[in-house]
Image (cartoon, rainbow, N blue to C red):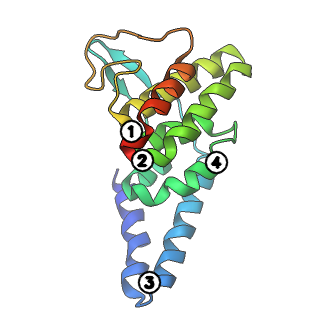
Amino acid sequence: MKVVAVAMLLFIAPIGVVGSSRVGAITQSDGIDQLIAALYTHRWPGAGIVAVPMTWNFNFTEPMQALLDIGPPVQGALLEKLGDPMIQDHVIILLGGVGDERAVGPIIEAMTRAADLPRKQRTQILLYGNAALTNITVADVIWHHGGGVIVDHCPKDPAGCWASWWRQHRQLFA
């Protein structure tokens, strides 16, 4: 954690020193791009539910934690990488932490496309998609948002359930 804090201080310092907001935005964008590039080289063991009531261990790598620490400004860059199978699972879980309604449709689309993936990869994409969408929307489509006892309301087609829910509720997020 100290390394991330130091990296963020070094990352933020040039923005504060430079008077131009345009240069600051470029510096932040470059930093985000570097952190996303680091997702390819920092092995992520994945996230999982470790206890009931529902308790997650996200096992975030340093680049993942740094992207979460930056917050909403990383959403656009993450959405651009959502189709990359090498880091798609990372991107989905990160969007669950920093995303807003603009990430909902793309995550549902990624979950729908997961039907063509090998079983293990499909299972991960659906699990992380359910977690991300539950966090962004605070909807009880699959599980109760606050955790608790796991009751999968839609085990056969979570992407379809989310798509149906999103069609009915999208206007509430605009």
Tell me if I can see residue 90 in this picture. Answer: no
> Which residue shows up at 34% across the image and 22% down it?
140
Q: Residues within 10 Å of mark 2 (few under 14, many from 20)?
A: some
In the image, taking residue 115 as reference, residue 174 lies left or right, namely left
- Front: mark 2 or 3: 2
Which residue is tagged 4?
Answer: 81
- The span from disc 2 to disc 3 (Cα, nearest Å) is 24 Å
Answer yes or no: do the residues labelled 1 and 4 have beta carbons within 8 Å?
no
Q: Position of residue 161 (x, y in %)?
A: 50, 20
> Which structural element holds mark 1?
helix
- Indicate left or right for 12 with 40 as reference: left
Instruction: Look at label 1 and name its amino acid.
Output: Ile
Q: Which residue matches tag 2?
A: 100
Res 6 quadrant in image? bottom left
Q: CA distance from mark 4 to mark 3?
A: 26 Å
Label 2 – label 4 distance at C-alpha? 16 Å
Locate residue 161 relative to residue 8 in the image: left or right. right
Residue type, numbered disc 3: Ser
List the residue tagged with mark 1: 136
Mark 3 or mark 1: whose residue is earlier in sequence = 3
Residue closer to the observer: 143 or 119: 143
> Pointer 3: residues within 10 angstroms few (<14), some, or many (20+)?
few
Q: Residue at x 30, y 18 (%)?
A: 54
- Rounded to the nearest angstrom, the CA distance separating label 1 from label 4 is 18 Å
The reply to whether discs 1 and 2 touch (Cβ–Cβ < 8 Å) is: yes
Does label 2 or label 4 sit earlier along the sequence?
A: 4
| Residue 28 image position (x, y, % from top left) | 49, 70
User: Rounded to the nearest whole Å, what is the CA distance between mark 3 and mark 1?
Assistant: 29 Å
